[in-house]
Image (cartoon, rainbow, N blue to C red):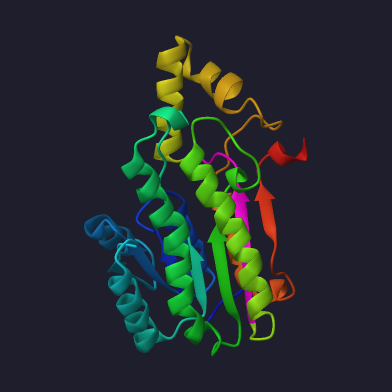
Amino acid sequence: MRLDGRTALVTGAARGLGRSISSVLAREGAGVVMADVDAESVRQAATTIPNARAVHMDLRERAAVSSTIEAVAETSGLDMLVNNAGFQRVAPIAEFEEDDWIGIVETMLTGTFLCTKHALPHLRRSSAGRVINIASVHGLVASPCKSAYVAAKHGIVGFTKSLALEEAGNGVTANAVCPGYIRTDLVESQVSALAESNNVSAEAALEDILLQPVPMKRLLEPEEVAELVAYIASDRASGITGSAIPIDGGWTAQ
């Protein structure tokens, strides 16, 4: 799956899945530009990955998104865009903070649109242009109390399909990866909160509550999802476009 000579821009790359994706793409030979709103954390993360460099980018700042992508493309070209940035808030709709709704949708859905819009002219010049959007199992099914996240991730899946149809003749593929729960600090903190609120052990909170809809009853490792991203980025996946690909332990098979 070698990606030698290609450049990838990965958003939300300072930690968790974005950092793992950056590491695997670099291992396969790609030059990786790691973008994140947390400038210091992404700078530190980039120092641990060969052939990676960091840029500060807030996806809610439209002019900054455009100028950053132009600068990346001018410096190293651009062959792959991985839209990964996002965050979560949990509350019933009647109690959901409006600013949280706006922030989630702006970062994940509008941010995916903006990055893609400004990257496309450069991706079309690549011999293997790729847009890989990190959606979620929640882009395919819903859970209560996650309305903004579910809405944004469903939107990303729909956006990916439209993009694939528009770019099919331009040499750019577009796909969405739809993971279930991944072993990250964010998920580990959710497990701890569930254990405390339900007065059960962390193990019980994980298996009986968080992983209740998951037949395999385990968290995904970030590297598992990153390997799938690397495959989609490779020449072996040149015929795959417009797909929403679950990696969810069987969640959506039910």
Residue depicted at 71% across the width and 31% down the height: 215
Residue toward you, 205 or 49:
205
Which x, y percent locates residue 83? 48, 63
The residue lying furthest to the top in this view is 199
User: In this picture, is 203 found above or below 70?
Assistant: above
- Residue 66, compared with residue 141, is above or below; it is below
Residue nearest the observer in this picture, 20 or 139: 139
Of all residues, the one furthest to the front in this rendering is: 94
Please tell me in which quadrant of the rendered image residue 161 appears.
bottom right
Across and down, in percent, residue 58 comes to 30, 62
Does the magenta portion include 180?
Answer: yes
Residue drawn 63% across the image and 25% down it: 212
Q: How many marks?
A: 0
The quadrant of the picture occupied by the C terminus is: top right
The image shows residue 62 at horizontal and vertical percentages of 32, 69
Picture quadrant of residue 13: bottom left
Q: Is residue 9 visible?
A: no
Magenta: main secondary structure equals strand
Q: Residue furthest left?
A: 40
Which residue occupies 22% across, 58% down? Answer: 40
In the depicted structure, whether residue 131 falls above or below residue 14: below
Magenta stretch in the rendered image: 172-182
Look at the image and tell me in which quarter the N terminus lies.
bottom right
Residue 220: percent from left, percent from top: 58, 41
Report the side of 87 relative to 144 (left or right).
Answer: left
Residue at x-position 65% and y-position 84%:
171
Q: Is residue 184 magenta?
A: no
Instruction: Say if residue 229 shows up in the picture.
Output: yes
